[in-house]
Image (cartoon, coloured by chain):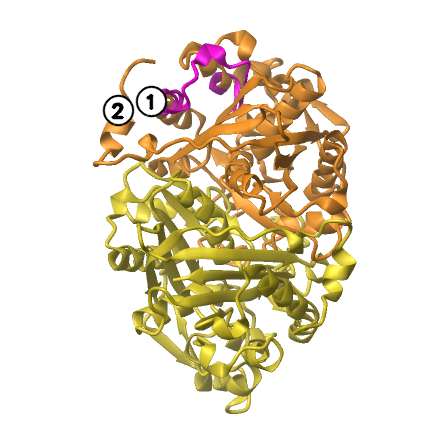
Chain colours: A orange, B yellow
Amino acid sequence: MAQHSAVVATAMKGNCSCELPFVRRPIKIAGMGAYLPPHRLPSAQLEQELALAPGWAEQMVGVRERRRRSAGQTAVQMAALAARDALDQAGVEAEDVDLVISASVCRQQFIPCTAAFIQRELDLPEGRSFCFDVDATCLSFLVALHTAAPLVESGVYRTVLICSSEIPSHMMQAREPETVVLFGDAAAAAVLTAAGPGESSALEGSAFATFSSGAELTELPGGGYLHHPSDPNTTPEMNQFHMRGRPVLKQALRVMGPFLDAFFARLGWDRMEIDWVVPHQASRLGVSQCTERWGFRPEQLVLNLATRGNCVAASIPLALAEAVHAGDVRRGQRVLLVGTGAGLSLGAAALTF
Amino acid sequence: MAQHSAVVATAMKGNCSCELPFVRRPIKIAGMGAYLPPHRLPSAQLEQELALAPGWAEQMVGVRERRRRSAGQTAVQMAALAARDALDQAGVEAEDVDLVISASVCRQQFIPCTAAFIQRELDLPEGRSFCFDVDATCLSFLVALHTAAPLVESGVYRTVLICSSEIPSHMMQAREPETVVLFGDAAAAAVLTAAGPGESSALEGSAFATFSSGAELTELPGGGYLHHPSDPNTTPEMNQFHMRGRPVLKQALRVMGPFLDAFFARLGWDRMEIDWVVPHQASRLGVSQCTERWGFRPEQLVLNLATRGNCVAASIPLALAEAVHAGDVRRGQRVLLVGTGAGLSLGAAALTF
């Protein structure tokens, strides 16, 4: 942990982004919401369908069961259900929402943005809120938090709704059983408001870095102009998600340690002072690095991988929402949200909840 | 102009988002960049190809010619060329970029985000910058400015690169000649830094609103889970852009007046104090409303519709970049960026340049 970052060294040229200051934002996650489709799909069933050995999924990726959306259920409907939960938890009326950010990989259609459809699904008053999408793959929720926090802090928005809703089941292919068994459908949402007088809640700091040499290690090559849906050369495989698990893990292992060292140096907290670490539920091997390499204790970790799978951008907020609802994560506690996303990107956000 | 907003009235419930304060951000667009593909496509040629009367395109949508990317040229390559121009204008080294935001409708592929590919195309040092995408269709550049400004102001990032690069030519269809002749390919970029001591540059205020009843008036229904590229029921038409020009204009006309009234009431400037109004180059009828209904004078407008077409999210930053490069928009002048996007969304940002 004390090693000085090789990444930092190579990236450094006079001033390095990893030396930029953290700015504390006195904002509050006033409510977290979750929505899980009722259909549970056990690994045993997938193993049978894909002719895999019993126990293969749990052994390979750490997932015993995951949820699957009901037929015809949309990610926007799921986002709205998670949003209702978050608004209820926050005690905020839907019509008071000033900004809706869709922070998801799944999108309903290419144009317009998915957040506009969430505004409609929630029946929010027209013109009362603004809607846009952010995309940093699995880190999208953290990016939404990072960009919305200063706007809430400065009073530009009073109430921000962030939704991450994912139905990765529609972009998987049987040819890559590791991804088929890894991912699950779910939605989560957060309501952000300013911290009240005397409340200690804050976004204490957040940091991100992208290593684009790894862009193709986790990709869905279709869906853009490179392999347009109407291009006769676009194959069905191009419209499916592909992940080269081991090279991704290798790159993540190389860069995450130094990234976290720089993060904690700027944050001024010790790793042991964190009450809860909510990692992106990337895979069994991915989350195990939290304790094996990155200096956290098992009892600090919030994990839902075994029963939810990797829910893409919804993974971190879903795990946080479930831990809040269970009474584990409480007001005033120190929470670290941390993960990797396609890009390859790293991200972390420290909260006083 | 003095009319009190019907939108505001219906949207209001105790506290209305249109009454939220503007917060001045002392940041500077240190450099604007532009890239135009060299191939000029005159309307006469398109009119011949589409069996339209000579002069039809200019009369209908106000476009005499537009650019088309070279065969195989990617929006990422175009974004990088515009970015190089913006960095040169700003006198900033590429390796000092802390954050890359792709603020475009066009994306290279579904996963990862396009900004990661821009980092690579610019050969930015790995891990030195973070990359994510924002999407609010034609307002994406304004949203990137709006969200990046407080992060630059507070020192979280020193140098932010925003790229809007569009190749709408690949999503048009001959069945809708109005859209075929309207759109053009182009890229634009901006470098944001903090305003220096004694510099008056600032983002004075920005505001946005979404009216999702109009979501399907401007849409590309494919490209998401609703009409997945691999779904046999997805037709080629679903993967093309559709705009119902007249209903969109009707909705925009209904809501933009009150939106601008509320914007100027919060900004504290009079419309006549604005040096330059840079509207989204939506269409001939769209931009003509600036003078016909929204209270601006023709000499305030920055227009490039006739020779560039509607360049989607690149339209506003391209028009601004060209006006800055021509020496029209100068330091210290008051600039209004304003437009509509699919959603239907409205947006405006006031700058002291």
SS state under label 1: helix
Q: How many marks?
A: 2
**Does residue B154 sit above or below A331 in this rendering?**
below
**Does residue A174 sit above or below B195 in this rendering?**
above
Magenta-drawn segment: A258-286
Q: Are marks 2 and 1 in contact (CB under 8 Å)?
A: yes
* Nearest to the observer: residue B339 or residue B231: B339
Residue B186 visible, this orientation: yes
Determine the residue positioned at 47% across, 10% down. Answer: A272
Q: Examine the structure image and report whether residue A275 is included in the region drawn in magenta.
A: yes
Inspect the image, locate mark 2, and give the three-letter code of the amino acid beneath it.
Answer: Ala
Residue B86 horizontal/vertical position (percent): 31, 58
Inspect the image, locate mark 1, and give the three-letter code of the amino acid beneath it.
Answer: Pro
Q: What chain is tagged by disc 1?
A: A
Residue A183 horizontal/vertical position (percent): 60, 29
Label whose residue precedes the other's in the sequence (2 or 1): 2
Q: Left or right of A108: which side holds A340?
A: left
Q: What chain is tagged by disc 2?
A: A
Residue pointed to by mark 1 = A258
SS state under label 2: helix
Determine the residue positioned at 44% across, 33% down. Answer: A23
**Does residue B125 sit above or below B331 in this rendering?**
above
Q: Quadrant of the C terminus of chain B?
A: bottom left
* Nearest to the observer: residue A292 or residue B286: B286
Q: Left or right of B127: which side holds A136?
A: right
Q: Quadrant of residue A217?
A: top left
Q: Quadrant of residue B59?
A: bottom right
Residue pointed to by mark 2 = A6
Q: Quadrant of the N terminus of chain B?
A: bottom right
Q: Residues within 10 Å of mark 1 (few under 14, many from 20)?
A: many
